[in-house]
Image (cartoon, rainbow, N blue to C red):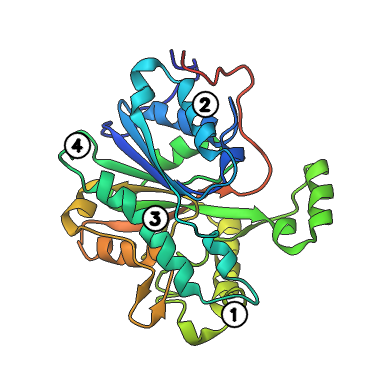
Amino acid sequence: MWSSTPAPRFPEAQGVLVCGIGRNVARAWPQGQGQGYSVKQTLKAFPEFRLCFYENDSTDKTVEAWEAWRSTWHPARQGWLQWVSRTLGRRPAAEDIGEDQGPLGEYTERLAEYRNWYVDEVILNTAEYPLDRFPWVWILDLDLEYGWDTPALWRAWQQLPADWLFAAHHGVVPSQQRQSTAGQRRRSDQTNQVDRWISYDTLAFQDHRFPEWPHTLGEGRYWQATRIKRVKRYLTRHLETSDAPLPVQSAFGGLGLYRRAPWVQSRARYRGRTGEVAHCEHLALHRTLGETGQGQGYLLPHFAVRKGRHGYKQPGDDAADS
């Protein structure tokens, strides 16, 4: 049985395809808590679902963690989770960029390659996953080890504007986590204090204030780009002052809900480079989806995905659906 926590049905309740990529993310999937717990609780809003994960070159126990998590599901549902695990001999893409490291292009092209696995195998695969049974797609980062507030997520989805095409959530980190030393962060973690939450997922963001493709290979150091700082200030201020959905051309933030029909119709794919321009892989995807004219993208600031402390677990909830 599922745990007894009541859950609303998603409007027009039908099945959802849950997709994500990860590497060395075992710590996010411990038994009975963390992201695995939050995913399981969230999926109570849907009558049917399939989970499709991708990982490559993990050196921790990522696959073992997913296997252990799957074993806590009811036997009839254990087949609803699948993954692909590859050994490509690559170091983590994020290690190839940074203040003194290589260009953004290789990083975003790799991420697009990995994400397009679930696009081809799952989202566009209407033979195995019929569109009438699975009209929704939920994209996750798989390293959200502290989970999220599931009732807040349900409320955010129930308040979506009628014309929504995709709904991204506001990804934030504690201000100390970005700006303090490792030692200071550890001390702050111990006291569980957060002075301020700030936006972090600026690469995927695009709206009427920031319409440009944000990066080219000639712009220099990725983390020092002026646009990143401007977008971070803008989104942090919006998070602190408004609960209204923000119309966007692109956004992600760690979780994103999509209407699947425009995705299938447009055959939209991730792309980390356009000609000589390197850019976040989400930008190209969202541009293609937007060109279908079938709705508007939104950033939902009243539900924030926190890459920091504060794990979510309801006291007394049973994480297993045995």
Using a 10 Å C-alpha cutoff, classify the residue at mark 2 as few (fewer than 14 neighbours), some (14 to 19) or many (20 or more): some
Specify the quadrant that holds the N terminus.
top left
| Residue at mark 4 | 128
Alpha carbons under labels 1 and 2: distance apart: 40 Å
Task: Return the residue nearer the eye: 97 or 35.
Answer: 97
| Residue at mark 2 | 68
Query: Could you tell me the amino acid type at mark 2?
Result: Ala
Residue 206's disc is none
Residue appearing at x 21%, y 37% in the figure: 129
Looking at the image, is mark 4 or mark 2 earlier in the sequence? 2
Residue appearing at x 20%, y 48% in the figure: 261
Q: CB under 8 Å between callouts 3 and 1?
A: no
Q: Position of residue 162 (x, y in %)?
A: 29, 48
Alpha carbons under labels 3 and 2: distance apart: 23 Å
272 left or right of 239 in image: left
Looking at the image, is mark 4 or mark 1 earlier in the sequence? 4
